[in-house]
Image (cartoon, helix red, strand yellow):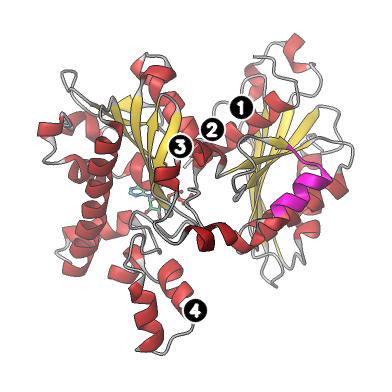
Amino acid sequence: MTAHPSPTTALPDELRSAPASRVLVLNSGSSSVKYQLLDMRDGSRLAVGLVERIGEETSRLVHTPLTGGGAEKRERTGPIADHDAALKAVAEELTQDGLGLDSPELAAIGHRVVHGGLRFTAPTVITDEVLAEIERLVPVAPLHNPANLTGIRTAQALRPDLPQVAVFDTAFHTTMPEHAARYAIDVETADAHRIRRYGFHGTSHAYVSRRTAELLGRPLAEVNVIVLHLGNGASASAVAGGRCVDTSMGLTPLEGLVMGTRSGDIDPAVTFHLKRVAGMDEDEVDVLLNKKSGLVGLCGDNDMREIRRRIEEGDERARLAFDIYIHRLKKYIGAYYAVLGRVDAVVFTAGVGENAAPVREAAIAGMEELGLVVDADLNAVRSDEPRFVSPDHARVAVAVVPTDEELEIAQQTFALVGNALS
Ligand code: ADP
């Protein structure tokens, strides 16, 4: 869920002609590319879009220019063979808006890269050596890193002269202490196969914890926050003074909270059981736990709006799915409260966290002794702005802070290529 700041039309003329102030953010999946072109003088969006079902007959590109006021979204349907064709189609759309990728105003391309292992603790300018390292991490991120690599190589071919920056989902979590990052399994086996807890959604946790400190009006270094990123994928993190000390996702994004389609925490023996007793192979178990579990597995729906609607109608399966989701959330809030010792704010973000007031209310209910209370009226307010939903007198703030991963990637990219004007 992303709020789009107003377009650049309000910029003063002298700034409008400043060179190389744009960053293209690319988030490449196995069959999709999401993109945003931002103007880093004010962080505004110039265009946003998505190419989906790449490689199929029914590919679709949806492009929305955000300059010039009132611009309409454009759609293309029909086969787009691969990422190269997808990015060329995106470039054509941008050119049509006077925002072509050959423009001297484009400063860099920032790529979301899911797995950076332990090596990448910060955004990194992409070199051949960096590409090789991202490739080396494919065994621990088999679904994501190959798609990210394809996106990078395609963008490099299109603009070989331009700096390309990798911003890693795992980077924010590399500050986790060993006692939080290690699984309690045989150390040699773990190290041989790089098995440890890496955590994901780091760009969002970093952005939201920083914005929360601003909302509290206190230096980041002084505040302890629990961030609950509740989208279709969901993760919690404990952040002490701006540094992640624990997070709920692990070797892969499967661990932790109940998600739209993922189980989150589960006894690993369930997987042996499914193989031995149900005759499933590891690919089937993988699909079951990643795609057919979580809310969708429990009640058939993974959209929280639909689940709430069914609950209102008295649907018991939807009620139970909601209760299981909330129970797990409460356990993580309690655990991270204990890990941090002192908490200044519990913060909700992403699609569910930003929009689902009943989830926030239920997750915090009964925690008065911990200083956590939600004010019903504040919680009911709908807004794209960071805000408190706890009453003024609350010992620990409860807040909603909309995430903006694309802006964070663009800012980190722009800062790294040395053009930061702000
Ligand atoms: P992701 O980026 O992981 O795909 P998002 O952060 O966009 O996910 O969140 C998507 C989810 O947000 C939807 O599946 C839905 O459950 C939830 N959501 C979006 N809008 C609302 C709303 N108004 N009320 C409740 N839930 C919502």
Give the residue type that dot 2 points to. His
Structural distance between the alpha carbons of marks 3 and 2 = 19 Å
Q: Badge 1 is on which residue?
A: 44
Q: Badge 2 is on which residue?
A: 4
Image quadrant occupied by the C terminus: top right
* Element assignment for label 1: strand
Structural distance between the alpha carbons of marks 4 and 2 = 41 Å
Q: Is residue 379 left or right of residue 203?
A: left
Q: Residue 60 shows which numbered tag?
A: none
Whether residues under marks 4 and 1 lie with C-beta atoms below 8 angstroms apart, the answer is no
Bounds of the magenta span? Answer: 125-134
* Element assignment for label 2: loop
Q: Is residue 191 left or right of residue 125?
A: left
Q: Is residue 161 visible?
A: yes
Structural distance between the alpha carbons of marks 4 and 1 = 45 Å
Residue drawn at the location 39% of the way across and 21% of the way down? 213
Camera-nearest residue between 337 and 421: 337
Q: Nearer the viewer, mark 3 or mark 2?
A: 3
* Element assignment for label 3: helix
Residue drawn at the location 80% of the way across and 52% of the way down? 153
Q: Earlier in the sequence, mark 2 or mark 1?
A: 2
Q: Is residue 53 left or right of residue 109?
A: left
Q: Is residue 68 left or right of residue 250?
A: right
Query: Is the residue 17 above or below the residue 139 in the image?
Result: above
Residue 126 drawn in magenta: yes
